[in-house]
Amino acid sequence: AREMKGVQWLCLLVLVITISACDRHKIYEEVYDFEAAVWNMDTIPEFEFSIDDNQPKRILLNVRNSIDFKSQNLYLTYYLLNEQGTEIKSELINIQLFDPITGKPSGKGNSIFQHEVEILPAYTFPKTGAYKIKVAQYMREADLQEVPSVGIRVEEIKK
């Protein structure tokens, strides 16, 4: 019985190391939750993080929508700002939430679907320091229903 405990302990240790190793590339990750899953066009979530080396980074946008989201696409604009608040990069992006032919949801989930979109695959920041990314919705509705959250993830590029 004592040997069995050692094996169980070893299995637990391997599991913990495996789980923590999966996220070793993460520098920053934050999610903004919308009240009642409604994203008002005047609500522009802001994500602040710091960069402490000059290696290229991978930046991802995470969006969650419910199965009841009315459109097949979601248009968003992200704004990357430096420490002084000056915009250094921005782009309008189109995220395909549902297949245009079948209507089948894309993303991971059952009734809420998560979409991870690479917005900057290998971005080299001009210098170290604090940066912000703001995300605005660019849809026709002022109050975008069925969007529980949006988030940003900054990663080291996997070698």
Image (tube, rainbow, N blue to C red):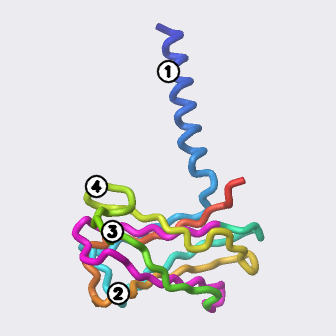
* Residue holding disc 4: 110
- Marks 2 and 4 sit apart, C-alpha to C-alpha, by 24 Å
Where does label 1 land, which residue? 8
Q: Which mark is residue 139?
A: 2
Dominant secondary structure (helix, strand or loop) of the stretch shown in magenta:
strand
Tell me the CA gap for discs 2 and 1.
52 Å
Q: Is the residue marked by circle 4 packed among few (<14), some (14-19), or many (20+) residues within 10 Å? A: few
SS assignment at label 4: loop
Residue at the location (56% across, 30% down)?
Answer: 13
User: In the depicted view, which residue is nearer to us: 34 or 68?
Assistant: 68
Instruction: Tell me the distance, in whole angstroms, between the alpha carbons under discs 1 and 3.
Output: 43 Å
Helix, strand or loop for disc 1? helix
First of labels 1, 3 by sequence position: 1
Query: How crowded is the residue under tag 1: few (<14 C-alpha within 10 Å), some, or many (20+)?
Result: few
Q: CA distance from mark 2 to mark 3?
A: 16 Å
Instruction: Report crowding for label 3: few under 14, some 14 to 19, many 20 or more residues within 10 A (C-alpha).
Output: some
Q: Is residue 25 magenta?
A: no
Q: Secondary structure at mark 3?
A: loop
The crowding category of the residue bearing disc 2, from other C-alpha atoms within 10 Å (few below 14, some 14 to 19, many at least 20), is: some
- Counting from the top left corner in percent of width and height, residue 159 is at 72, 53
Sequence order check: which comes first, mark 2 or mark 1?
A: 1
Residue at x-position 56% and y-position 24%: 10
Three-letter amino acid code at the position of disc 1: Gln
Of the two numbered discs 4 and 1 on the same chain, state the one appearing first in sequence.
Answer: 1
| Alpha-carbon span between mark 4 and mark 1 | 33 Å
Boundaries of the magenta span: 58-86
Question: Which mark is first along the chain, 3 or 2?
Answer: 3
- Mark 3 sits on what residue? 98
Expressed as whole percent of the image width and height from the top left, the position of residue 28 reads: 57, 64
Of callouts 3 and 4, the N-terminal one: 3
Question: Looking at the picture, which amino acid does disc 3 mark?
Answer: Phe
Spatial distance from mark 3 to mark 4, Cα to Cα? 13 Å
